[in-house]
Amino acid sequence: MNLQVLIPIVLILSAVGLRSADQPGPQRSYLNRLSRLQNPQPLLADHPTWVEPIRETNRWEAPALVQDPGGTLHVRAWRWSYNARGIIEIPNQLHAPHTAIILVHPWGIDDGQGWNTPEPAGVADFCTPDKNHLAARHTAEVINPFLKSLRSHIGAVLYSLPGARDSIRRKLYRSFDHKPTAQEQREGKRELEERLSQFVYRGSPLRQSFNLSTTTPVVDYFQHFPGLDASARYNNEGFWELPIPVTQDITVFPEDVVVYDGEGYDKLRAFLRAQGIRHVLLTGYATDMCFARTCAGYENLSKDFNTFLVGDATLATFPAHTTPRFATSTHIAFASINQLITQISWIQNRKAAP
């Protein structure tokens, strides 16, 4: 028998979920009634190679949060509450055409397109070629099939990349205000190959010697030899000015949109609103950095859209580990304090109830 716990707080939310302060709308009373879940199964357990399952057993279920009339996209989600002393699971019913999938930073690094990690000590993306290849496997095996399964139902698919839009990627990918023709895409692909092949992917080797203070040698050591130096010393001058492509492990469709961090969040927000988007399923890399704090990161999006972090469609950086699963699980759990977390198997497009 479920233990019914009534928390005497009435939350006032918009009829379509959490609303932005500059978008007042109809309101409803939300009764924050929690029912204990008996013998719940671990969360994020479908892809243990990529994310360590969350085994917290103090779990509750709350009433539906997003309830779009006629919504066919069912998205169960969870969050952590210290005050409730456990995980709260919440069902949601989204109108699929008002939903976007955003993939944060699917960098085409070491994937055969020509943008390669510089040798002998350069760093980019997950910071070693082996780790980049491992992340590419996750993209191909987990994220790309997820995109394919929902593409025909949802309102938009977007990818975010660093920097600003350049003349080459303008021809390759659809952006906020331009959709390239087939001819432009052929030209862009040729220009990308030429530009990336001309760069010298070689920087300086590791420093062999440097001076240390006799009183604070540890301070000086890390100043001279930091754990992560992505500067021109090791990557060569101009590496970060190259046009970063979307990874080949994603099937990019002509209608898909590429977002550039340099254009800023305001433009992204305006574009999504113009497309009628109110809900975002967020995927991508890296959970501990870009996924949270770049232009299309959840710290921005969750202020204006009903945002769901797809916990098994993201990877955290994982220094000193051979697997990302522990780091990813940790950072998703930390994000769950103020974000809703879902997983691929919890996102289902079904017919609306009669």
Image (cartoon, grey):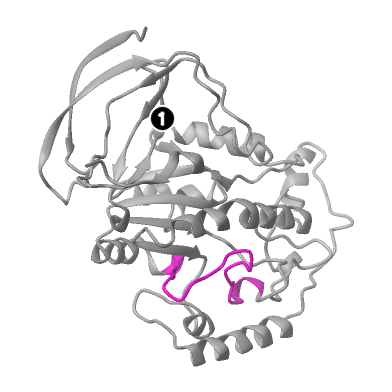
Indicate the quadrant where residue 240 lies.
bottom right
* Residue drawn at the location 27% of the way across and 26% of the way down: 63
Region in magenta: 239-262
Residue 306, how many percent across, how many down? 31, 45
Query: Is the residue marked by circle 1 packed among few (<14), some (14-19), or many (20+) residues within 10 Å?
Result: many
Residue 132, how many percent across, how many down? 71, 57
Magenta stretch prevailing secondary structure: loop
Q: Is residue 258 on the magenta stretch?
A: yes
The reply to whether residue 229 is in sight is yes
Q: Is residue 221 left or right of residue 285?
A: right
Residue that numbered label 1 is attached to: 79
* Residue drawn at the location 39% of the way across and 37% of the way down: 339
SS for callout 1:
strand
Whether residue 300 is situated above or below residue 312 in the rendered picture: below
- The N terminus, quarter of image: top left
* Residue drawn at the location 50% of the way across and 92% of the way down: 183
In depth, the one of 143 and 20 nearer the eye is 143
In depth, the one of 199 and 81 nearer the eye is 81
